[in-house]
Image (spheres, helix red, strand yellow):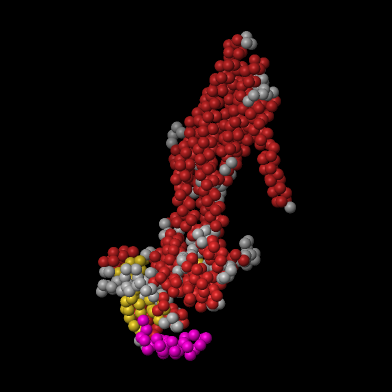
Amino acid sequence: MELTSRSLSLRNLGSLLKVGVLPLGILAVVAMMVLPLPAYLLDLFFVTNILVSLLVLMVAMHTYRPLDFSSFPSLLLIATVLRLALNVASTRVVLADGHTGSDAAGKVIEAFGKFIIASNYAVGIFVFVILVIINLVVITRGAGRVSEVSARFTLDAMPGKQMAIDADLNAGILDAEQATQKRDEIAKEADFYGAMDGASKFVKGDAIAGILILAINIIGGLIIGITQHELAVGEAAETYILLSIGDGLVAQIPSLLLAIATAIIVTRVSSTQDMAEHIGKQINLSRAWLPVSGVLFLIGLVPGMPNTLFLVAGLISGIVGYLAMNINNDESSKDEISNRSGNDFNEDDASGGAIDLEDVTDYSPISIQLGYGLVEMVDDDTGGPLISRITGIRREVSKLLGFVIPPVRIKDDLALSANQYRIRIGQTIVGEDIIYPDSFLCIAGEEVSVKISGHEVKDPSFGMDAVWIKSNQKSEAESKGYVVIAPESVLATHLSQILNKFAGQLIGQDDVQVLLDNLSKTAPNLVESVVPKLVPLHNLTGILRELLSERVPISDLRSILESLASISSRNLSIVDTAEALRPTLAGLLIQQIAPLNQPLPVITLEADLEQMLIKMSRQSGEEGLVLDNELAQNLLTKISETNQKLSNEGKSAALVVSPAIRRQFSLIVRQHVEDMIVLAFTELPDNRKINVVASITG
């Protein structure tokens, strides 16, 4: 209840400032420059000016990052205008009523004139000049330079930060809402530093205005006092200079406070601590304090020095260093105890022990889990290249298949070994292996005759013999004819293979609707007449999934819908509809195997073997093509050996069979030879030359 009341009161305060106080206050400031003010109102406004300046300084010191006080430039402008308005009002009173005595402009100016400068106008002038020099030359100029450089660097860094956000969004590290929030923060940061670059000019102009107003008050007061009020030169000088100096100091001190606040804001580094904690933690080093103590003790022993003072300072420094050393040791011990005995606590007794639904659910379509030894591969601070490689893979596969592959979520998993990674589609583990971030994977080329020493493994993408070697062996491996692959490329290639294989599971109704919405911009009547009138959205999604499961691109969605419109009256199942669409789309699949100007390499089945398979398929009926173990093993072995031979030669080929057994035979083959493309004779284009590179016998 107390928290709610406080929130309501803060909200009411903000509404009050917005609706009433702030607009009226600005109008009052403008009125102060025109209307004469009595002395007691001047006192009130001078005290308010000091209050505002102190408040701004304290808020600046307790911000964690500059953007936490993003209203500072506007507040600085208002405070500067208030102070200048007070200078105008006080100047009017000083010049008009200064001859009546030192209290003519109010008690505050009188106090600054008599108490602070001890009624000595020469001292007052020097003090004022020193304050102006500190404000104008040191603090304001430095803060202005920092603001200018920060604004320039912030603007220059914006494109890189935007690209980093896009990369994190594509990699699944950020969701759309988080990415939008980060973009807003970048825009606000640029606006803030740009505004601070201009706001620092307010402080500089205010200091210059203070000097001019002081000169006007002194010169004008002497002229008015001597000529109009017939005061002696000494009496006029003492009266008007003291009032002018008091007026200048009562305005210059708040100006100095705001200048310090400006410098603090523009030099503030974003952190999770306020300035006092930030500085205190970083200077709390016994290695710094103890040498300081030793030097001070040595100076304290030099004859002629104020020995007692230096010895006391050295003693204090030594005590601070000793305390700092104990505090750091205690913190280290606490961290060590916490790390070692963290499992001894009951989770219900610890803060944050509750398990949320988000902790046990993960709806990411694609995710990669990394062992702790691989985290540096995605660390931007160390130049981790994995995220950019994955983004490139997603872009390539998306262009190839015709729909946007969902973002990949990357996270660490302490349950994995240090160099292990695991790829999931949904919640299903579809790939895992071990890579070494400080090594390279070598695959033997065609002309390799000399083996290279290293850790022998199988390539996770294609199952080829490979060797992990150290970085210093890279040149040797390349000279011996090995293909050398960086670890991030090994993982990215494995991911690419999995995305192609499981593309059918990655597209959903929402993705299909996005494709339809995009097509409706150029073919609205086609989309409207087919979906959902002839083919419901969920059926179209199922058809596209069937096509993608055999790596048939769906980029030509116009042709797919036109073909669906022509065969919709046949009332085919989703699987049979996808099969009927294949001849229309086969060209997209074939162009991945060989360029248009080259013969299409194919693998065929011996005629007798194919006829036997067709007969067996008809006899099996709805069960599909059922092969006995010996025949299936013999066929798959020969197909696998042929495919491996072609792969070693850097070639690829499609397996061509009769349309009657294409789908059933493809299901059997792809379970053992994942990258094999199985086509029907009817899917071969008439304008392509065919090159039979192998024939499989029974």
| Magenta stretch in the rendered image | 604-633
Q: Splitting the image into 4 quarters, where does residue 678 fall?
A: bottom left
Foreground residue, 188 or 10? 188
With 439 as the anchor, is 257 left or right in this view?
right
- Classified by dominant secondary structure, the portion drawn in magenta counts as helix
Q: Is residue 270 visible?
A: no
Foreground residue, 446 or 437? 446
Quarter occupied by the C terminus: bottom left
With 437 as the anchor, is 313 left or right in this view?
right
Q: Look at 44% across and 78% down and name the residue there.
A: 670
With 366 as the anchor, is 637 left or right in this view?
left
Q: Look at 66% across and 36% down and name the residue there.
A: 22
Is residue 348 part of the magenta span, yes or no?
no
The location of residue 491, given as percent across then percent down, is 42, 67
Foreground residue, 562 or 458? 562
Foreground residue, 27 or 97? 27
The location of residue 284, given as percent across then percent down, is 51, 48
Q: Is residue 297 above or below residue 407?
A: above
